[in-house]
Amino acid sequence: MTKYVIKRILYMIPVLLGVAFLVFTILSLTPGDPGSIILGITAKPEDIAALNAEFGYDKPFLIRFFNYIGDIIFHFSLGTSYQSRGPVMADIMSRFPNTLTLAVLSMAVSSIIGISLGILSAVRQYSVLDHVCVVVALIFASIPGFWFGLMLLLLFALKLGWLPSFGASSLKHFILPTLTVSLTSAAGLLRLTRSAMLETIRQEYIRTAKAKGASEKRIIWKHALRNALLPVVTTLGGGFGASLGGAIIAETVFAMPGMGTLITTAIRQKDIPMVMGATLFLAVLFSFVILLVDVLYAFIDPRIKAKYQNGGKSRG
Amino acid sequence: MEERAVAETTQTLRSAGVTRSKKKTSQLKEIWRRYRKNKAAVLGLVILVFILGIALFADLIVPYSKCIEQVGADRLQGPSLAHFFGTDEYGRDLFARVVHGSRFSLFIGVATSLMALVFGAILGASAGYFGGVVDNVICRIIDVFACVPPILLSLAVVAALGTNLRNLIIAITVSCIPGNVRLIRSLVLTVAEQDYVEAARSYGTSTPRILFRYVLPNAMGPIIVNTTMSISDMILSAAGLSFIGMGIQPPSPEWGALLSNAQTYLFTAPYMLVFPGIFIILSSLAFNLVGDGLTDALDPKLKD
């Protein structure tokens, strides 16, 4: 088991380097050099050249990439913003907590709603509750999160005046954005949990348990749930990615100072180091979440456990 | 004696579902018969035809000139008989803009899904079928792509290339290739292990023939379903990116862009939000419903 975890953690090193290379390469396709972006094309060529040298832009692509990686590892720096000329990391650090709070809250709310209703729906298949859940989930899966957010904003902030419509200064400010992000992703989770649960209930070991005379409760909790939740756990990593994505868009709806608004503003200002730093920062975070989910999965899936337990490569 | 042997062979083939030419020609009919039984799926198809009709005949419904015609006196008017969906801040007719906007969403949804399918099929099928080094290289690259949340990948592409229709399509396609590659790879892996593929191989059938004659048709069901459902996701992503100003730009009547504009007038003209939103939901819902219906209709195990 430890072997699997260590192997998985070591694999992160090339993957993270790959992610950095991917993001760096895509954003290096941007036309223009820092000198002419910051000073404009009418500036004196020697000024542009001097500024390019300051940003290390006079060096070839691969050298720039390794310098970038070196700065991250040794100085914990993601470069200098074209716009503020200050460190990118400082802006990220001031915005990131909002996005993380929103993503984690949404993830929690959508998991609770999606998984519990999915189970209920499957256990009482064809009941009124099941039909309502299926229809509502289908509609929510088709609603753009930001549109739902705007509707919430209209109702709760404008018409009823219960909640603030923009900003991130208190937990109250997070209620509407969290609902926006979580309700649309809960829909997908509900559909997934429901079908996984229905699939499991049809398995032979459930029939065996029934034949043995085990109680309904015991069958659901002891036999079905643990098996049905395995495929659900594998999607939690991707779910976090979706929550991050939802958070990025919801920030625009609720004018929240977070990573999403940081990135979109930076794109408009052609502040490439900022876009690069923020994207890479979130991608690394996401990679660690995927790692965590993989390890968690290995612990709860007895099949993987068994494969590594006897130190054996017995079952490939 | 010989007759019996023939009868027996036919029997075996029949039970394997290989012959019965009658059935082969009517497979589409068979799928349609099963599809038709699902009311929700039929509803999805009706909505889909409705939206497609609007996109195809947009010019007949209302001329494009109505989209750009600015009537100063009719600024920010609510829905009325003259303007079914109201007007925007320049006095442009929102009904015309929403109708013509349908072309963007459907085109982007279908184009990105098909492109992602082509890339996914080439990479996924090669990885699954050839295995070994090919599989390893493709999988490692996909692992890296999958570590960047889709929307961030799209944003990075947009940041590098700029905001317009072509770049939006590239950005969304890139972000959904990893999922497609993984899906098709695992489908091909499952199918390639089946006995009939083994049998074909033992006859000396060529690799391309095995891939196209046996592996792909048998993996087709889930691929079709996945592509249909992904159109729905792509419509939502495109609208989302346009909404935050990173997709189709405002003068174009794309639904996400219309909503982005409507947000400015949220408090004074909330009706501007309603119709573009409803049309995004309807088109996304239609593809979801059709996808759900196809899941059951295309699954040979559920044949009754």
Image (spheres, rainbow, N blue to C red):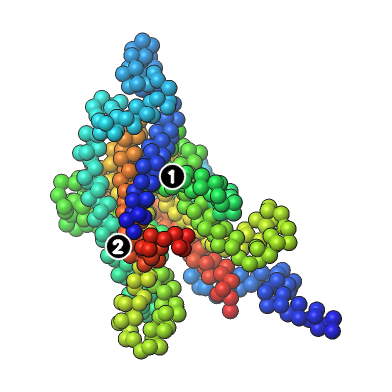
Report how far apart the C-alphas of labels 1 and 2 lie in the structure: 25 Å
In this view, the residue in front, B126 or B216, is B126
- Left or right of A123 on screen, residue A166: left
In the rendered image, residue B53, in percent from the top left (x then y), is placed at 56, 56
Mark 2 lies on a secondary structure that is helix
- In terms of image quadrants, where is residue B187? bottom right
Q: Which mark is residue B233?
A: none
Within-10-Å neighbours for mark 1: few <14, some 14–19, many 20+ = many
Residue underneath mark 2? A111
- Residue assigned mark 1: B145
Residue at horizontal 22 percent and vertical 50 percent from the top: A101
Q: Quadrant of residue A306?
A: bottom left
Q: Subunit of mark 2? A: A
Tell me if B116 is positioned left or right of A144 in this view: right
Badge count: 2
Q: Which amino acid, by three-letter code, is at mark 1?
A: Phe
- Position of residue A106 in the picture relative to residue A137 (left or right): left
* Figure check: A212 above or below A137: below
Image quadrant where residue A144 sits: bottom left
State the quadrant of the N terminus of chain B: bottom right
Residue type at mark 2: give it.
Answer: Ser
- Determine the residue located farthest toward the right in the rendered image: B2
Residue B162 picture location, percent across and down: 43, 33
On the rendered image, what quadrant is the C terminus of chain B found in?
bottom right
Of residue B38 and residue A314, the one placed in the foreground of this image is A314
Q: Nearer the viewer, mark 1 or mark 2?
A: 1
As helix, strand or loop, the secondary structure at mark 1 comes to: helix
**Does any portion of residue A183 appear in the rendered image?**
no
Letter of the chain that mark 1 sits on in the rendering: B
Farthest residue in the front direction? A311
Depth check: give the residue in front, A169 or B282.
A169
